[in-house]
Image (cartoon, grey):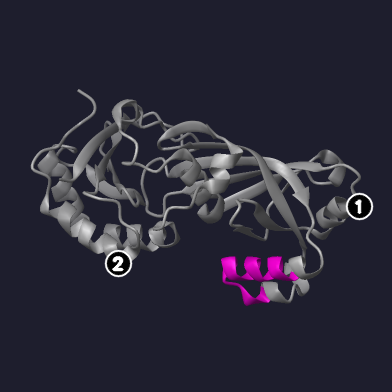
């Protein structure tokens, strides 16, 4: 049976500080929500906004990568300004850096910032065949063939960030992730298509979402219901009205492995749980 989980009221939440799903995380069993390491890997690969904080000796202390791609081991390939690449190549010691990614809900909801993730580590510069492979990975990750040639305004230096410390702060709460857990984790299988899936739900299935929340008592009359997050374990909706904004999460009967299986899970969800099981009184 799909399971509704009440989440923290976000009426006073700042757009830059997503609130913890406090009541749910106290009792939620493992295997019913994405673990912190998987969430961090998902954010590293798919969050819309990213900046790299660098030592002041390099020049600019913060730069925006023109492209990024996450390797199988969790290291992050970045396309940065040429002077950064030169500094990394000629440095005697390791150069520390912090990648800060910010995730924003792809639909219009109050408090749209969903997550922050910080990956602190050390920069290195691939060379030779490894550099050619890294360029191809960056071009594929951004779907931008121009990155293959590195001509004109898009030219830059390819560097690799080796993670040493990871912190994720999102709708589930703030957690440190051990480097080995981060390395072994995988991103959520729905993350690549989450934007268009949520936008489709918002544009074409608003009535079903509202009915689901009304039927389970998750929202009041007159509140707007919008999808705010989706993962293999469930769907999070945001209910907002004149006096409050709160989230409710509906968990699927079983985790879904791809977008095709998601259709069946959503149809089962829209048929409606027999009751709303809340973790909070």
The boundaries of the magenta stretch are 132-146
Residue 90's disc is 1
Was residue 137 drawn as part of the magenta stretch in this picture? Answer: yes
The x and y percentages for residue 139 are: 63, 70
Q: Could you tell me if the residues under marks 2 and 1 are in contact, i.e. CB atoms within 8 Å?
A: no
The residue most toward the left is 274
> What residue sits 33% from the left and 64% below the top?
259
Q: Is residue 234 above or below residue 71?
A: above
Q: Is residue 9 visible?
A: yes
Q: Which quarter of the figure is the C terminus placed in?
A: top left
Q: Nearer the viewer, residue 280 or 256?
A: 256
The x and y percentages for residue 34 are: 39, 43
> What residue sits 35% from the left and 62% below the top?
258
- Secondary structure under tag 1 reads helix
Using the rendered view, name the quadrant where residue 157 is placed: bottom right
Q: Nearer the viewer, residue 164 or 211?
A: 164
Near mark 2 (Cα within 10 A), the count class, few <14, some 14-19 or many ≥20, is: few
The x and y percentages for residue 249 are: 27, 41
Near mark 1 (Cα within 10 A), the count class, few <14, some 14-19 or many ≥20, is: few
Q: Which quarter of the figure is the N terminus placed in?
A: top left
Q: Is residue 117 visible?
A: no
- Left or right: 223 with respect to 257? left
The residue most toward the top is 281
- Left or right: 198 with respect to 55? left
- Left or right: 61 with respect to 92? left
Residue carrying label 2: 260
**Main SS, magenta residues:** helix
């Amino acid at each position: 049976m799909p399971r509704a989980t009440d989440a923290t009221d976000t009426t006073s939440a700042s757009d830059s500080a997503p609130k913890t799903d406090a009541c749910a995380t106290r009792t939620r069993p493992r295997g019913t929500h994405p673990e912190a390491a998987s969430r961090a890997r998902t954010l590293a690969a798919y969050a819309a906004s990213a900046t790299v904080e660098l030592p002041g000796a390099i020049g600019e202390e913060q730069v925006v990568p023109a492209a990024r791609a996450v390797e199988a081991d969790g290291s992050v390939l970045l396309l940065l300004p040429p002077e950064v690449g030169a500094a990394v190549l000629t440095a005697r010691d390791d150069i520390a850096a912090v990648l800060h990614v910010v995730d924003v809900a792809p639909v219009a909801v109050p408090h749209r910032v969903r997550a922050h993730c910080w990956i602190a580590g050390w920069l290195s510069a691939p060379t030779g065949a490894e550099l050619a492979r890294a360029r191809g990975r960056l071009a594929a990750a951004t779907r931008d063939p121009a990155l293959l040639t590195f001509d004109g305004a898009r030219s830059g230096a390819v560097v690799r960030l080796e993670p040493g410390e990871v912190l994720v702060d999102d709708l589930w709460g703030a957690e440190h992730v051990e480097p080995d857990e981060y390395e072994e984790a995988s991103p959520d299988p729905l993350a690549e298509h989450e934007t268009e899936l949520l936008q489709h739900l918002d544009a074409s299935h608003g009535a079903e979402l509202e009915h689901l929340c009304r039927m389970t008592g998750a929202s009041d009359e007159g509140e707007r219901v919008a999808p705010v997050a989706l993962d293999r374990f469930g769907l999070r909706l945001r209910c907002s009205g004149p006096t409050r904004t709160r989230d409710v999460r509906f968990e699927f009967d079983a985790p879904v492995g791809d977008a095709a299986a998601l259709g069946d899970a959503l149809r089962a969800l829209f048929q409606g749980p027999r009751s709303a099981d809340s973790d909070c009184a």
